Amino acid sequence: MRAALDELQTELTAAIADMRRAIFALRPVDLEALGFFPALTKLVADFRDHNQLAARLELSGPPDSLPASYELPLFRIVQHGLYNIGLQRPREFCAGASYGGSVWRRGALVAR
């Protein structure tokens, strides 16, 4: 009986964690609270920790020059890319982007 209760507790804890990740995916609270660049950094770190991957985020360009209207769409693009990487289960990946003035010069999610 005790083993069954322990297993149920483990499953419930995992289900709650999955639900919290889903809620965050629908409405990225960190984006509002932290700002775009810190929220991206946290997104990649959380993804790295959850999936146990070697991961890093490389950003270049002045962080204060990104128009606010770009933040949510770009956050969603990176979020979806991370989801796809999670499906592939690579050993490591690198997310990088460069922003200068009015356009993104390059952006990539590279999985190995």
Image (cartoon, rainbow, N blue to C red):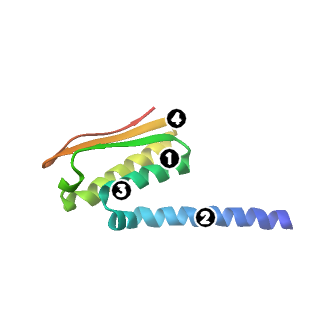
Residue 42 drawn at (x, y percent): 42, 55
Distance from Cα at disc 4 to Cα at disc 3: 24 Å
- In this picture, is 80 found above or below 15? above
Q: Amino acid at mark 3?
A: Pro
Q: Secondary structure at mark 4?
A: loop
Label 4 and label 1: CA atoms lie apart by 11 Å
Comparing labels 2 and 3, the label whose residue is closer to the camera: 3
Q: Which label was assigned to residue 48?
A: 1
Q: Amino acid at mark 1?
A: Arg
**Mark found first going from the N terminus, 2 or 4:** 2
Dot 4 or dot 1, earlier in sequence: 1
**Mark toward the start of the polypeptide (1 vs 2):** 2
Residue 27 appears anywhere in the view? no
Residues at discs 2 and 3 in contact (Cβ within 8 Å): no
Whole-percent x and y of residue 35?
31, 61
Q: Mark 2: which amino acid?
A: Ala
- In the figure, is residue 71 to the left or right of 84? left
Residue at image coords 85%, 67%: 2
Count of numbered tags: 4
Whole-angstrom CA distance, mark 1 to mark 2, is 19 Å
Disc 4 residue type?
A: Arg
* Mark toward the viewer: 2 or 4: 4
The dot on residue 38 is: 3
In the rendered image, the residue lying farthest to the top is: 112
Residue to which mark 4 is pinned: 91
Question: Can residue 45 be spotted in the picture?
Answer: yes
Q: Position of residue 85 (x, y in %)?
A: 45, 42
Spatial CA span between label 3 and label 1: 15 Å
The residue tagged 2 is 15
Q: Viewed as shown, does residue 5 lie left or right of 20?
A: right
**On screen, residue 17 above or below 58:** below
Number of other residues with Cα within 10 Å of mark 4, as a class: few under 14, some 14 to 19, many 20 or more: few
